Amino acid sequence: MASKDDPMPTCPAGQPTPTGAPSASPPTASATSVTATSVTAGSVTAGPVSVTSASAGSVSAGPGPLPRVRPPGAPGIGSIFVLAFLVILVPGVAVYVLLDWAGLPIGGASLLGLLVVFLGLGFFPTVLRRLGWVPTKKRRS
């Protein structure tokens, strides 16, 4: 939307109008008629189809899949990232710190900490499924 300080006012369609040009009022549904080509399942029909502006906004490509709505109380993406942090990163850093504190050289402590991180990466999908945060895979019969 344009403010009163904006030097370029915008049209209803969002296109800027030239300075000094009067803005046109939106056309009525009975005054506008457009010729379009009908498209059905990837093929184009050969005849013109009359479309009025009243029905042009309600043309849809068909029923699409409805977006999944997260039920109240279900974990969101932030919860999943926190769980990943706790399952993957924290144990690896904890193993490194404990082994370094125990006197293991930095290379050995780092590699064992990295091994724990990789194990956490492997177990993370299982943890998500067991918590019920991700649906289980359906087995083929």
Image: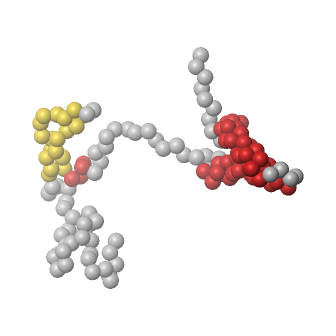
Q: Is residue 52 above or below residue 63?
A: below
Residue with the most extreme bottom position: 5
Kindly identify the residue that appears in the image at 25 percent across and 66 percent down: 15
- Residue 134 at what x, y percent from top left? 63, 39
Q: Can the viewer see residue 98 in this picture? A: no
Where, quadrant-wise, is the N terminus in this rendering?
bottom left
In the image shown, does 58 or 46 lie closer to the viewer? 46
- Residue 119 at what x, y percent from top left? 71, 39
Residue with the most extreme left position: 47
Residue with the most extreme top position: 141
Which image quarter: residue 100? bottom right
Kindly identify the residue that appears in the image at 61 percent across and 22 percent down: 139
- Residue 137 at what x, y percent from top left? 60, 29
Residue with the most extreme right position: 102
36 vs 69, left or right, is left
Kindly identify the residue that appears in the image at 19 percent across and 78 percent down: 19
Q: Can the viewer see residue 140 in this picture? A: yes
